[in-house]
Image: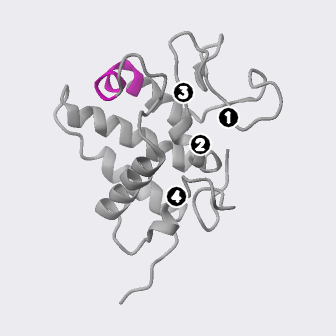
C-alpha cells in the first residue's frame, strides 16, 4: 500500500495543465463545467490561502460581490473574513485567475448557476471539496488523500495546499 502524499504546488500545476488540455465540445454543459474546474484549480494554485473561502465567494454584475471588476478594469477580491471595512480589504487577483474568471463569466457560469444566485460557483463546501478531489485523482493520481487536498471546511490551520504553497 502506497502512503498518501501531500498535495504540492507542482501537483496542482500538473492537474491544471492536464484539465486545460482536455476541453469538451464548446457550448455544452460539460464545457461550462470545464471552465469552472479551470477557475477552481487556478484559484487554488494562485491564491491557496483563500481556498477555504471558495464556496462563499459571490459575484454580482454591479461589482458589489467578493469578486469584482475595479474601475481600472482589474479583477479584485474582497476579503470575506476581513474585520475592517470589506470595501477596503481587497486585493488584486492573479492574472491567470482573472483571465479564467473572465472566460467563466462570459458564458459558463450562466449554465451552472441560477440567474438569481450571487454565488460565483454555486457549490457547497463539500461539493467543491469532492470536485477538487475528483480532479486531482483523475489527472494526478489517487495517492493524494482527502486531508491533503484542500481544507475547504476551514477547520484546518493549513493555508490551503500542504507543504510549501504560499500566496493570497
Residues at circles 2 and 1 in contact by the CB criterion of under 8 Å: yes
Q: Which residue is mark 1?
A: 80
- Residue beneath label 4, please? 150
The quarter of the picture where the C terminus appears is top right
Residue 58 is tagged as 3
Figure quadrant of residue 88:
top right
Q: Is residue 129 left or right of residue 51?
A: left
Which of pointers 2 and 1 lies earlier in the amino acid sequence?
2
Magenta span contains residue 100: no
- On the image, the x and y values in percent for residue 80 come to 67, 34
Provide the residue span drawn in magenta: 104-112
- Mark 1 and mark 4 in contact? Answer it, CB < 8 Å: no
Alpha carbon separation for disc pair 2 and 4: 11 Å
**Label 1 – label 4 distance at C-alpha:** 18 Å
Separation (CA) of disc 4 from disc 3: 20 Å
> Seen from this angle, which residue lies furthest right?
84
Numbered badge on residue 159: none
Amino acid at each position: 500500500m502506497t502512503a498518501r502524499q501531500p498535495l504540492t504546488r507542482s501537483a496542482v500545476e500538473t492537474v491544471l495543465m492536464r484539465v486545460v488540455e482536455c476541453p469538451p465540445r464548446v457550448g455544452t454543459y460539460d464545457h461550462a463545467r470545464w471552465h469552472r474546474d479551470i477557475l477552481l484549480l487556478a484559484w487554488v494554485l494562485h491564491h491557496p490561502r483563500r481556498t477555504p473561502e471558495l464556496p462563499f465567494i459571490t459575484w454580482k454584475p454591479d461589482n458589489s460581490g467578493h469578486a469584482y471588476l475595479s474601475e481600472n478594469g482589474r479583477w479584485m477580491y474582497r476579503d470575506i473574513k476581513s474585520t475592517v471595512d470589506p470595501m477596503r480589504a481587497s486585493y488584486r487577483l492573479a492574472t491567470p485567475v482573472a483571465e479564467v474568471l473572465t472566460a467563466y463569466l462570459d458564458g459558463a457560469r450562466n449554465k451552472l448557476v441560477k440567474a438569481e444566485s450571487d454565488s460565483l460557483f454555486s457549490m457547497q463546501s463539500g461539493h467543491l471539496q469532492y470536485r477538487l478531489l475528483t480532479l486531482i485523482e483523475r489527472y494526478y493520481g489517487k495517492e493524494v488523500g482527502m486531508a491533503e487536498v484542500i481544507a475547504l471546511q476551514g477547520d484546518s490551520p493549513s493555508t490551503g495546499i500542504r507543504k510549501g504553497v504560499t500566496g493570497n
